[in-house]
Amino acid sequence: MVMAIFEYDVALEKQAEYIRMTQEEIKPLWESLGCKSYDVWQPTGGGTGFVKSMLFEDMAGMKQIMANQAAEPAKKIFGRFAENVSRKVCEKRT
């Protein structure tokens, strides 16, 4: 299994719309393309920070799904909201 972990900020005034768009459009699109799990987290106490995790079967599958042209709408929506984005890719070792 491979997990892509993103850390980013969403402005306070955009958070409600971002969460709605994630539930209605972003998450279903990624999961329809083969992402095993798409989850968004926000640290307790509020603020602008968010973390999202995307779980894939393997590295080749992740690369294929992430490069799929059908994912462009989800990437564009995410880009409208997310700032200061960083990404890590982790492989399960157990």
Image (spheres, rainbow, N blue to C red):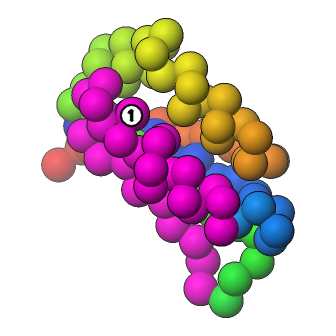
Q: Which of the pair 83/72 is nearer the observer?
A: 72
Quadrant in the picture for residue 87: top right
Q: Identify the residue at horizontal 17%, vertical 49% (top origin).
A: 94
Horizontally, residue 22 falls left or right of residue 56, namely: right
Farthest residue, direction left? 94
Q: Which of the pair 61/72 is nearer the observer?
A: 72
Is residue 31 part of the magenta span, yes or no? yes
Secondary structure under tag 1 reads helix
Q: Can the viewer see residue 43 in this picture?
A: yes
Horizontally, residue 63 falls left or right of residue 80, namely: left
Q: Identify the residue at horizontal 74%, vertical 48% (top origin).
A: 81
Give how far across and how far down residue 61 sits, in percent: 29, 19
In magenta, the rendered stretch is 16-44
Give how far across and how far down residue 55 sits, in percent: 32, 42
Farthest residue, direction bottom? 45
Identify residue for label 1.
Answer: 30
Residue type for callout 1: Trp
Q: Is residue 47 above or below residue 19?
A: below
Give how far across and how far down residue 52 sits, in percent: 51, 53
Q: Is residue 15 above or below residue 6?
A: below
Give how far across and how far down residue 6 sits, in percent: 58, 47
Crowding near pointer 1: few (<14 within 10 Å), some, many (20+)? many
Q: Identify the residue at horizontal 51%, vertical 67% (top origin).
A: 41
Q: Quadrant of the N terminus?
A: top left
Horizontally, residue 42 falls left or right of residue 9, namely: left
Q: Can the viewer see residue 53 in this picture?
A: no
